[in-house]
Every structure is written in C-alpha cells, then in structure tokens.
Amino acid sequence: MKKLCVSLFALAFVLVAAPAFSADIELAKKSTLESIVKAGEIRVGFESGYLPFEMTNTKGQYIGFDIDMGKQLAKAMGVKYAPVNTAWDGIIPSLITEKFDIIISGMTCTQERNLAVNFTDPYIVVGQAILLNKKHEGVVKSYRDLNDPKYVITSKLGTTGEQAVKRMIPRATYKSFEVETEAVMEVIQGNADATVYDLPLIEIMQAQHGEGKTVALTEPFTFEPLAMAVRKGDPDFLNFLNNFIRQYKNDGRWQQSYDKWIKSDDWQKDLQN
C-alpha cells in the first residue's frame, strides 16, 4: 500500500507539473534573449549626452561607461552591438513597443518607472549633487538651504534630478531644460543659482567650465541605483543580464571602465561639441 501511495503521488505530481513545465518552455521561447540570438544583434537604447555614460565623439561614434558595458554584453551573447540613440522622454515607450531590446542609459531604478519596465540589479550607484553659483559659496551648504523661492534651480526634464528638486526642494523656483548641459550653463552664466543632477556630471562640468564661477556640493543627497531596463514578463532575459552584471563587476572589466570614464577625464578632448 505504501508503494502504491508513492506511485500515485508521483503520477499526480507529473500530471500537475507537466502543464506548468510546458508553459515555462513556451515563455522561454518568447524571451527577448532568444530573439536577440536569432537576430544576431542586440539593439541598445540610450540618449547620447549623459556624461560620462553615453556620449558622441568627434568621429560621430558613441562612447562612455554604458557604451562599453553594452558592447561587453553583446560580446557575452555572441552578437553584434547595435546602438539606438533615442530622446529621453520617449525611451521607455520605445522599449515597450520593441524599437530596441534593452535600455542601458544611466537610468535610475524608480518605483514609477518600475511600473512600466523591469530593472536588472544595479550596475552602479550614484546620487543627486549640486552645482552652485559661486556667489552663494558659504551661504548655501546643502540642498536644504536652497528651499526658498528666491533661488532658481535647474535640472533636466523627466529625470530624477527634476524629481529630487520637486520632492526635496519644493519651495525653490524651478526651471527645466531638455538637455542637462543647458541646465548647467544657466548656473555657470549666472542665470540660475544652482543645478541638481547626478554626481558624475556635476563633477565633470565643474572641472570643465566652473572654475571661478561655480562651487560643487559633491555630497549626494539621494540614493540612485542605475540599472538596465527590459520589457516586463521576461525572467530568462533578466536572469542572463543579472549574471552578466555580476561577472562584469567582479572580473575587473567594470573597474577598468570606471577608471577610464569616471575617475579620468582624458576622454573629454574627443567629445563632439
């Protein structure tokens, strides 16, 4: 009787598990991972202009921290890297409508975005910092000191910099710009009091243009993990990407790219004006 019960249990398990297993196979076949391998290329969406993550050099080539990682991802998959430069305000809709396969574009994992796309594990963590007009040096020491209507603060439209201003400095007078460098130049030229943006860009712009004109407050006041974004309902692709990120961050390639693009500024002379 005991053997019969075990056999009946095993049979029941097979009957119950078979449809689920079959469904999993069908899900795997529909994965973006499979379509990328079949197509022989991975189409990567980003917006060029976010220093030092994705930029355009004087030869018209895309360069930067994210670009290097995207190329290494393509190599790991044995396919061609196909860059797709896309306006930021349409980048998530373009992913959803399959204009490309993945977003690697310095995108912060926010709960709002997570409602529309799925994120990988973070590949780097940054935060919002402040580039301050020098006339406020010593008076404004943190974002809290800017929470006054007399201060004009800039950032890029649709970014976490803009969200940080609205959420954490709500009383300030806010001006948004389509391009982050335009928001920065408003401060450098004295038309605004401060700009809020990701720390790497703040440090770069201070070094490039801010000497004698601005002060960088480089202590981040937000926590911002950057990750790759993919369409929902694709666990196989997410699994591959998370394993890739883990390998990339721990075999020396991530650190090599970080040293090249974030710790050094040698690449700046090659940028397209």
Image (spheres, grey):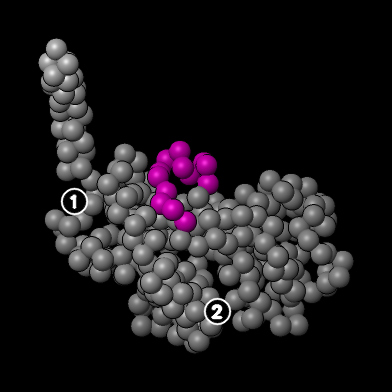
| Image-based side of 19 in relation to 109, left or right | left
Foreground of the two, 134 or 68: 68
Where in the figure is residue 134, as x and y percent of width and height?
79, 74
Magenta region, residue range: 110-122
- The residue tagged with tag 1: helix, strand or loop? helix
Q: Is 132 rendered above or below residue 22? A: below
Report which residue position mark 1 lands on.
Answer: 34
The quadrant holding residue 3 is top left
Crowding around mark 2 (Cα neighbors within 10 Å: few <14, some 14 to 19, many 20+) is few
Q: In this view, which residue lies farthest toward the top? A: 1
Identify the amino acid type marked 1.
Answer: Glu
The quadrant holding residue 15 is top left
Where in the figure is residue 106, as x and y percent of width and height?
48, 61
Foreground of the two, 235 or 205: 235
Tell me what residue is drawn at x 17 percent, y 43 percent.
29
Where in the figure is residue 79, as x and y percent of width and height?
20, 65
Q: CA distance from mark 2 to mark 1?
A: 36 Å
- Residue 24 is covered by the magenta coloring: no
Report which residue position mark 2 lands on.
Answer: 263
Q: In this view, which residue lies farthest toward the right? A: 139
Tell me what residue is drawn at x 39 percent, y 61 percent.
246
